[in-house]
């Protein structure tokens, strides 16, 4: 017997977010494979849409009821969820188990960077570093913090009206002037061209679906694409090899168990060295709008 | 032209995905009819068990006013599986049966029926209604017959 809660709109929403992102993710994955979609803006748009669109299509009212499921829906997932697997075990038990595992993985993935975050030094940052950061467009009021670790680490935090750059002592000691300039420009690139807003809105969309493996994968891929995009922005005037060298240093000091972080670094290095095809307009705008509109029309009929 | 060809390839992939989903939707119902929700008409009482998963109760005493025709039988599978059996002639007798938790509660002032631990009898809009639990099966009876007949009907509820 399927639990009664499964038919309640709120519980149904969680499941349908997963169902819709699974279908949308699957269709867009095969489409991008078919088109050999390169890294770039189009890819980011598709990943972002797969993260956000199911939150809305799953929330369209009137779809959780029996009338819609029995008479109007193109696909009623409860039929599949009720299928038996083993003795007393149904498909929906498996789906719940998968959701719990993914939620734990998501929590762990969020926890890892917090545990790995270097402590801030109490001393003031070097004045040339502060001057250098504040000379970048829009960073006139940027706060600069110094992390006490000897490893090469750079990060940013804060809000668009109050950005903060954190540089480790190790980065100041081990990086050349050109390398330091390239990594600071990379961090600055995260705050330009609406990237901060897009990344944080998609992060919020991902937090709403911690149980969803598709969202987990899409956000991770989006983050890699965003880093590659910021690298491209930071090295527009040159310095690609310097930045790749810094990333290699960070790669070598990153915990080998942090597979995700190392994987991201590897892809960024490959992109900087020109081993990854890049294009920001791989699919024409009308075709992209058509595809996303079609998904928006089709998904509500799947419950 | 490139935009058109990418849109066409998208449509082809979407069509395949929708086809697979529809196949799963229909196939699951064919392989396991019990996963399909909704109402189905059942021809006779013998087939109800296969469709509903339990044997419904029928009254061995049935007043002549309810007719000699076969009853209309409908099995509805939702979070609870219900069987509705209706005799319709000069009088109407409607039984709604299910197993598990009670789906409705009798109104205040409903009277219990003797010999049944979980039972209630009441009148509403000129019709008599009864709710009774017999051997784990809940039966909600609605009729325009008099209360005396309803008590006799309830007392003779048995598997067919």
Image (spheres, coloured by chain):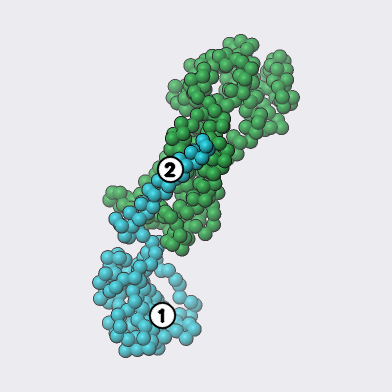
Chain colours: A green, B cyan
Q: Nearer the viewer, mark 2 or mark 1?
A: 2
Mark 2 Cα shell of 10 Å, populated few (<14), some (14-19), many (≥20)? some
Q: Position of residue A107 (x, y in %)?
A: 49, 36
Numbered label tally: 2
Let me know if residue A56 appears in the view: yes
- Same-chain status of marks 2 and 1: yes
Residue at 66% over, 29% down: A192
Question: Eyeballing the image, is A235 above or below B6?
Answer: above
Name the residue nearer the viewer: B96 or A72.
A72
Residue A280 circle label:
none
Q: Secondary structure at mark 1?
A: strand
Name the residue nearer the viewer: A274 or A251.
A274
Residue at 29% over, 85% down: B68
Question: Eyeballing the image, is A212 above or below A231?
Answer: below
Q: Quadrant of residue B71?
A: bottom left
Drawn side of residue B8 relative to residue B55, left or right: right
Question: Eyeballing the image, is B105 above or below A285?
Answer: below
Q: Position of residue A102 (x, y in %)?
A: 44, 39
Q: Chain of mark 2?
A: B
In the picture as drawn, the residue positioned furthest to the right comes out as: A140
Name the residue nearer the viewer: A288 or A215.
A288
Q: Earlier in the sequence, mark 2 or mark 1?
A: 2
Mark 2 → mark 1, Cα distance in angstroms:
53 Å
Mark 1 Cα shell of 10 Å, populated few (<14), some (14-19), many (≥20)? many
Q: Position of residue A293 (x, y in %)?
A: 54, 46
Residue at 45% over, 53% down: A303
Residue B142 circle label:
1
Question: Eyeballing the image, is A303 above or below A236?
Answer: below
The residue singled out by tag 2 in the image is: B13
């Amino acid at each position: 017997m399927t639990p009664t809660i499964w038919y309640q709109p709120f519980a149904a929403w969680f499941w349908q977010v997963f169902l819709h992102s699974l279908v949308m993710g699957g269709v867009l994955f095969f489409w991008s494979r078919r088109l050999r979609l390169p890294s770039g803006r189009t890819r980011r748009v598709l990943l972002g849409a797969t993260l956000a669109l199911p939150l809305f299509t799953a929330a369209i009212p009137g779809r959780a009821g029996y009338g819609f499921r029995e008479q109007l829906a193109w696909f009623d997932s409860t039929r599949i969820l009720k299928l038996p697997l083993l003795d007393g075990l149904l498909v929906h038990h498996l789906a719940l188990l998968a959701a719990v595992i993914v939620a734990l993985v998501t929590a762990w993935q969020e926890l890892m960077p917090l545990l790995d975050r270097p402590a801030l030094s109490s001393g003031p940052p070097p004045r040339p570093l502060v001057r250098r950061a504040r000379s970048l467009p829009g960073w006139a009021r940027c706060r600069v913090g110094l992390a006490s670790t000897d490893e090469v680490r750079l990060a940013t935090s804060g809000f668009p009206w109050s950005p903060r750059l954190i540089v480790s002592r190790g980065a100041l000691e081990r990086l050349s002037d050109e390398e330091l300039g390239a990594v600071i420009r990379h961090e600055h690139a995260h705050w330009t061209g609406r990237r901060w807003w897009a990344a944080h809105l998609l992060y919020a969309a991902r937090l709403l679906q911690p149980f969803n493996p598709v969202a987990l994968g899409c956000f991770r891929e989006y983050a890699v694409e965003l880093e590659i995009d910021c690298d491209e922005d930071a090295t527009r005037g040159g310095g690609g090899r310097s930045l790749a060298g810094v990333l290699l240093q960070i790669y070598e000091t990153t915990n080998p168990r942090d597979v995700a972080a190392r994987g991201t670094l590897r892809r960024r290095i490959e992109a900087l060295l020109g081993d990854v095809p890049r294009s920001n307009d791989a699919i024409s705008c009308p075709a992209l709008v058509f595809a996303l509109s079609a998904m928006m029309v089709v998904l509500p009929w799947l419950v | 032209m490139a935009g058109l060809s990418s849109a066409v390839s998208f449509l082809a992939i979407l069509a395949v995905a929708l086809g697979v989903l529809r196949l799963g939707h229909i196939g699951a119902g064919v392989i396991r009819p019990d996963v399909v929700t909704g109402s189905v008409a059942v021809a006779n009482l013998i087939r109800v068990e296969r469709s509903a998963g339990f044997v419904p109760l029928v009254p061995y005493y049935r007043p002549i006013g309810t007719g000699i025709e076969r009853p209309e039988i409908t099995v509805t599978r939702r979070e609870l599986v219900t069987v509705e059996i209706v005799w319709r002639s000069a009088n109407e007798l409607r039984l709604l049966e299910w197993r598990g938790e009670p789906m409705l509660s009798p109104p205040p002032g409903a009277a219990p029926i003797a010999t049944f631990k979980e039972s209630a009898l009441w009148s509403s809009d000129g019709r008599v209604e009864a709710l009774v639990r017999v051997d784990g099966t809940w039966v909600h009876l609605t009729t325009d017959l008099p209360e005396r007949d309803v008590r006799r009907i309830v007392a003779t509820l048995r598997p067919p």
